[in-house]
Amino acid sequence: MEAFGLLLQGFGVLLTWKILALMMVGLILGIFVGVLPGLGGPNGVAILLPLTFTMDPTSAIVMLSCIYWGALFGGAITSILFNIPGEAWSVATTFDGYPMAQKGQAAEALTAAFTSSFIGSLFAVLLITFLAPSVATFALRFGPPEFFAVYLLTFCSFVGLGREDKHKTIISLTLGLLLAGIGMDTVSGQLRMTFGSTELLRGVNFLVAVIGLFGISEILLTMEEKLALRGHTASISLRTVWKVWREMPRYWATLLRSSIIGSWLGVTPGGAIAASFMGYNLAKRFSRDPKSFGTGRIEGVFAPETAAHASGTAALLPMLALGIPGSGTAAILLGGLMVWGLNPGPLMFVEHKDFVWGLIASMYLGNVVGLVIVLTTVPLFAAVLRVPFSAIAPMILVSCAIGAFAIQNAMFDIWLMLLFGIVGYVFKKIGIPLAPFTLALVLGNRAESSFRLSMIGAGGDLTVFWSNPLVGTITTLAFTLLFWPVISALFDRGKRLLLPAKSERSGPA
Amino acid sequence: MPRDSGALLLCAMAESEAEIVVEDPDAPAADSPAVTSIRTVDMVVSVLLVGFAALMAFDNWRTGMSWAFDGPQAGYFPFYLSVVLAGAAIYGLVTSYRSKSEAGTAFVTRDQLRRVLQVFVPTLLFILGTQWLGIYVASFLLVAGFMRYVGRIAWWKCVLTSFLFTAAMFVTFDVAFDVIMPKGPLEAAFGR
């Protein structure tokens, strides 16, 4: 009940004309970047981040998170109308969304996508409202060893559970951690890896890296593609909305299932993609008529959209409560918070109560306003695709440069941004994942200082990471995840040795 | 008179209202020859990473990478990170050397490289221009020039769009919010 009161207070903070206006601007900009070819969640937030440097923290984070919601909504528009998934997690939406558009049911498909996104987000926001404070309270008891164990768990889960080549994930992680270490050592105050350069004294700024890695590299990658497209337009009438909404309760099981899967996977890194496919596949399996999936079934739009958005929103839960982002975009939002000296984590719930609850309240309000905006303005945004890319690309480049410069007023940072743009372009093409790099860069210093603080506390004794059941469990879990591919391979081998007579695929009936 | 058709993205209104069709006549051809393979780039990147790791390891060894009585020294963490990075990069070097699938996949085709350079070179010039002319003049030149030479859009549209965009940026950042941006002789002439 305490959460409820605080939430109401949060709404009180938001209900000013200024914030509501910023919210609308954020949502519209977000949908805009979501619709544009090649741009999406993390890129959009990274590019538009500089716009918020001029604001107070509350307005800024409200606007940023609204850009994020907008980008999520916008991805569905191109998936359904043009069969172009803006993001990997929109791929599953195209399976049934595009066939529906071809059958002339584009408006229904869009309404279904927007409404289910809204439901998925709402589910996850409710989860955040009631779970995040307890997680934060619990985490208040964490000391440096516990925090280090949690950071370790995050890094290890990328290596163990990621679908990319293991050595490429490790390269991405260690490179990010190394770059995070450049500059002044936070514990001893010593300079390291600066090679006498005054520019490197400040270290590699996370946001500069992100703008380059996601913004510039994405422009380069988009230029490589064939930019021609062909698709449908649609305008949504009130009658269509009503029709879809009336049909919706019949699919409550799908919606609930996808919400739960999404929220669960969202808390773990990189979950939104897995969540959307899993939501889709499970809806197909539990359906009485699985064969009709892929031919334009409305359920095939509900399932992945709900899961993807529940996951995208749930990724903010560990970020707020523990300071550990659950997705690349959440990492960028975390970096955005750090610009104002706000350190997400358990202490934020105590020290910046107003701010946290304002943010949570903005998630509710942003999603409601977003739903209304997308439902009413779809034709407008579909038309954005007619604007030539040769006009949009240079404007995005300029915005990136302005953003990179504004962070520390340094020309050097613009060059650094370009360098990261090239790195991001090459890495994406040779399959080195960028998400671990982003996360390592933003968490590197905290991970290192919590490790060294626990070493100072324990007199250099490494067993401190197994000194109590809590930290011991997390550390052990981290190592299990790190070696998960090896462990599961051993298990399989063991099983085959035990059951030599059984043929390969005779598993459970 | 220049043809008013965006070569990059030609905005063609479709006959029927229910369709949006955008053409891209300049698109990279699917059969364009590969400039280099994924394998080559992967190997080059691995070598560069090993070099970078060695440099970092050396610097951290200089800073102090041993274990003092109260825990690790400043260079300890980064030193071992460089070792892990070098190890992973060497492993990557060997696997990509052996990989047949990577050797057969194009990293970038000639047509694609041409298009990438179409953005990259103007960006480079823009950043250089920012140092001498200030960001606002440079951005006006970038947007107008890019639209004109890459997009082949009518010049008056390029100048107008670019001017409006730059003016909006100037008003937002310089006039309204007082964000410091690199400026050049033009701003100085107007006393800003």
Image (spheres, coloured by chain):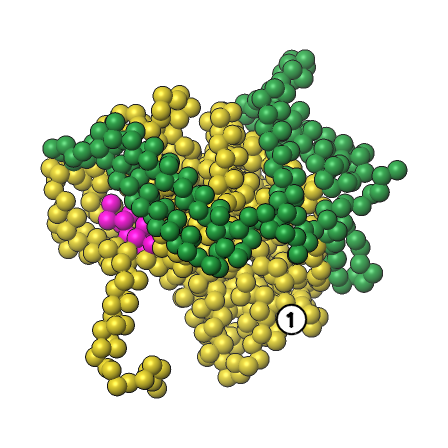
Chain colours: A yellow, B green
Lateral position of residue B14 relative to residue A395, left or right: right
| View extreme (right): residue | B1
Q: Amino acid under label 1? A: Met
Lateral position of residue A199 relative to residue B169, left or right: left
- The residue at 37%/62% (across/down) is A264
Image quadrant holding the N terminus of chain A, namely bottom left
Tell whether position A156 is magenta.
yes
A90 above or below A217? below
Q: Residues within 10 Å of mark 1 (few under 14, many from 20)?
A: many
Viewer can see residue B10: yes
Tell whether position A283 is magenta.
no
Image quadrant holding the C terminus of chain A, namely bottom left
- The residue at 47%/59% (across/down) is B100
What residue did someone put label 1 on? A100
Q: Which chain is disc 1 placed on?
A: A
Viewer can see residue A15: no
Measuring from the top left, give residue A144's x and y in whole percent.
21, 42
- The residue at 51%/25% (across/down) is A411
Circle 1 sits in a helix, a strand or a loop, which is it?
helix
- The residue at 35%/24% (across/down) is A195
Magenta region: A148-159
Instruction: Examine the image and state in which quarter residue A186 appears.
Output: top left
A85 above or below A492? above
Measuring from the top left, give residue B112's x and y in whole percent.
63, 48
Measuring from the top left, give residue A41's x and y in whole percent.
52, 50
A344 above or below A121? above
A282 above or below B20? below
